[in-house]
Image (cartoon, rainbow, N blue to C red):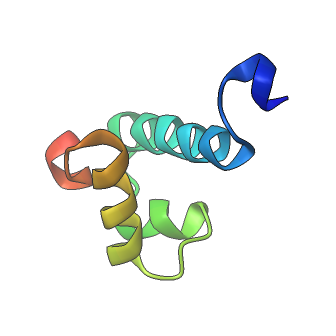
Amino acid sequence: MQKVLKASATQLIQQRISTESKRLLSNTNLSIKEIAFEFGFADHAYFSNFFKSQTRMSSSAFR
């Protein structure tokens, strides 16, 4: 699978979480904390760090 998609399973999951969190941030009124919990992050600060590492932008700035 990695040879075909040129990405590991972890990278694919991270890309999907990033894409879906962008969708939720721009199209819903859910708080960042609610979105973090939606994706299984125990702490919204960890989600914010993850989001910034994926997009080079904070989740609040993206919104």
Quadrant hosting residue 12: top right
Quadrant including the C terminus: top left
Residue found 26% across the figure and 52% down from its top: 59
Above or below, 13 relative to 33: above
Answer with left or right where residue 38 lies relative to residue 54: right
Please say whether residue 10 is visible from this viewpoint: yes
Where residue 54 appears, as percent x and y from the top left, is 37, 45
Q: How many marks?
A: 0
Determine whether, in the image, residue 22 is placed left or right of residue 58. Answer: right
- Rendering coords of residue 10 (x, y %): 66, 50
**Up/down of 61 relative to 3, above or below:** below
Query: Is 7 displayed left or right of 22 in the figure?
Result: right
- On the image, the x and y values in percent for residue 17 come to 56, 46
Q: Residue furthest front?
A: 3
Q: Is residue 10 above or below residue 62?
A: below
Residue in the image at 69% along x and 40% along y: 8
Taking the view exactly as shown, the residue that stands out farthest to the right is 1
Pick whichever, 18 or 8, lies toward us: 8
Frontmost residue, 1 versus 35: 1
Looking at the rendered image, the quarter that the N terminus falls into is: top right
User: Which residue is situated farthest in the top direction here?
Assistant: 4
| Residue displayed at 39% across by 74% down | 46
Q: Position of residue 43 (x, y in %)?
A: 44, 81
